[in-house]
Image: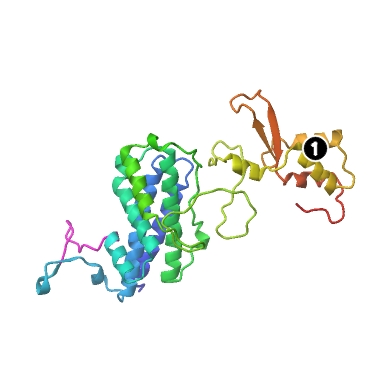
């Protein structure tokens, strides 16, 4: 028969995967609320599994007792079943024993506070949305690392990350309600003394987006598409410059140094123009973004070299970039 703590562990993993899947749905109106509730449920099950494992799998170790001395008795729920310790009691006890990291404790505490207040203040506010994503992303990462540390189970194959559905434009703090401001201040207060670089646990994670080649397991695949159903990702000016660093002059110079037979002629212009509407290779910046007839300037991604490689002969030792 499977130990009870393993059953709780499996249910905990199922709950956090459900939370992630709901959060990552392209269209889901109650996204953060549903994610928060399921994530807390997952953590309570995970902490209970850890508690049972540390207490020889005795279910009675989870039961709340009332009274004192020999008169202590198990507290019952409304249905008459034994009441078990709730999430913050277990988190506090495990922290006191050195079994639960301080950053993880603070993250769980913030998630529980969010659950308790979310119906009263959370709206479609972009500044708050970004902060909550940072909190939730840390919660998922902490869960993955705690599962590996406590139970020697890797969740790398479970697509264990939250997708940033949109990178919000910063909103002035005055646009927040009083309740939202209080919650953000609370998060800020518990997120002091940041964890060391590459530390496995965190209260929140810093959210940024960069398009880079990566072979790491943590890397999230991103694909440029004009599909209206795709998840939106908004890039800052800095990120656009990083992804499309070459203007027309720089692109031309790069091609001259790369190919033996390159010339600035109609062939070159035809090839370049054929891919300028493909965002993998070109970004068109309008002087007036709201006016499609305004002046434009084009910027190019180095991947455009792969297109020209099909038409020109590379110099020996040409830069592969």
User: Quarter of the image holding residue 272?
Assistant: top right
Relative height, residue 45 to residue 295 (above, below):
below
User: Quarter of the image holding residue 94?
Assistant: bottom left
Relative height, residue 121 to residue 70 (above, below):
above
The residue lying toward the viewer, choosing from 192 and 278, is: 192
SS assignment for the magenta stretch, majority:
loop
Residue drawn at 36 percent across, 70 percent down:
99
Relative height, residue 176 to residue 6 (above, below):
above
Query: Is 80 within the magenta?
Result: yes
Q: Is residue 107 visible?
A: yes
Relative height, residue 161 to residue 47 (above, below):
above
Residue at the front extreme of this rendering = 193
Query: Is 177 within the magenta?
Result: no
Residue 270's spot in the image, x, y percent? Answer: 81, 34
Residue at the bottom extreme of this rendering = 56
Residue 155's spot in the image, x, y percent? Answer: 48, 63
Q: Is residue 11 visible?
A: no
Residue drawn at 25 percent across, 71 percent down:
61
Residue drawn at 77 percent across, 41 percent down:
251
The residue lying toward the viewer, choosing from 60 and 283, is: 283
Q: Is disc 1 surrounded by few (<14), some (14 to 19) or many (20+) residues within 10 Å? A: few
Q: Where does the N terminus fall, quadrant-wise?
A: bottom left
- 149 left or right of 83 in image: right
**Secondary structure state at the residue bearing disc 1:** helix
Residue 159's spot in the image, x, y percent? Answer: 51, 56
Magenta region: 74-87
Tag 1 residue: 271
How many marks the image carries: the answer is 1
- 28 left or right of 310 in image: left
**Colouring style:** rainbow
- 282 left or right of 49 in image: right
């Amino acid at each position: 028969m499977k130990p009870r703590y393993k059953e709780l562990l499996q249910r905990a993993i199922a709950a956090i995967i459900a939370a992630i899947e709901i959060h990552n749905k392209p269209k889901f109106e109650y996204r953060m609320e549903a994610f928060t509730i399921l994530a807390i449920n997952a953590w309570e099950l995970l902490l209970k599994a850890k508690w049972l494992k540390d207490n020889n799998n005795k279910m009675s170790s989870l039961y709340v007792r009332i009274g004192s001395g020999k008169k202590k008795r198990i507290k019952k729920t409304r249905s008459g079943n034994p009441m078990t310790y709730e999430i913050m009691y277990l988190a506090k006890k495990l922290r006191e024993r050195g079994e639960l990291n301080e950053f993880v404790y603070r993250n769980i505490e913030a998630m529980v506070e969010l659950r308790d207040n979310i119906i009263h203040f959370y709206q479609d506010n972009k500044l708050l949305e970004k902060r909550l994503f940072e909190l939730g992303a840390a919660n998922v990462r902490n869960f993955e690392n705690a599962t590996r540390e406590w139970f020697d189970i890797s969740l790398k194959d479970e697509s264990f990350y939250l997708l940033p559905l949109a990178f919000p434009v910063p909103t002035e703090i005055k646009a927040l309600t009083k309740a939202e401001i209080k919650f953000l201040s609370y998060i800020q207060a518990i997120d002091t003394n940041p964890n060391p670089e590459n530390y496995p646990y965190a209260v929140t994670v810093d959210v940024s987006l960069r398009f880079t080649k990566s072979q790491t397991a943590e890397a999230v695949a991103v694909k440029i598409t004009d599909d209206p159903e795709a998840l939106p990702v908004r890039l800052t000016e800095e990120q656009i410059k990083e992804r499309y660093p070459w203007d027309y002059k720089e692109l031309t110079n790069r091609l001259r140094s790369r190919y033996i037979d390159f010339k600035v002629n109609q062939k070159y212009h035809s090839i370049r123009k054929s891919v300028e509407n493909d965002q993998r290779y070109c970004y068109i910046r309008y002087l007036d973004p709201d006016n499609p007839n305004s002046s434009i300037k084009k910027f190019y991604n180095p991947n455009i070299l792969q297109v020209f490689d099909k038409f020109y002969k590379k110099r020996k030792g040409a830069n592969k970039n």
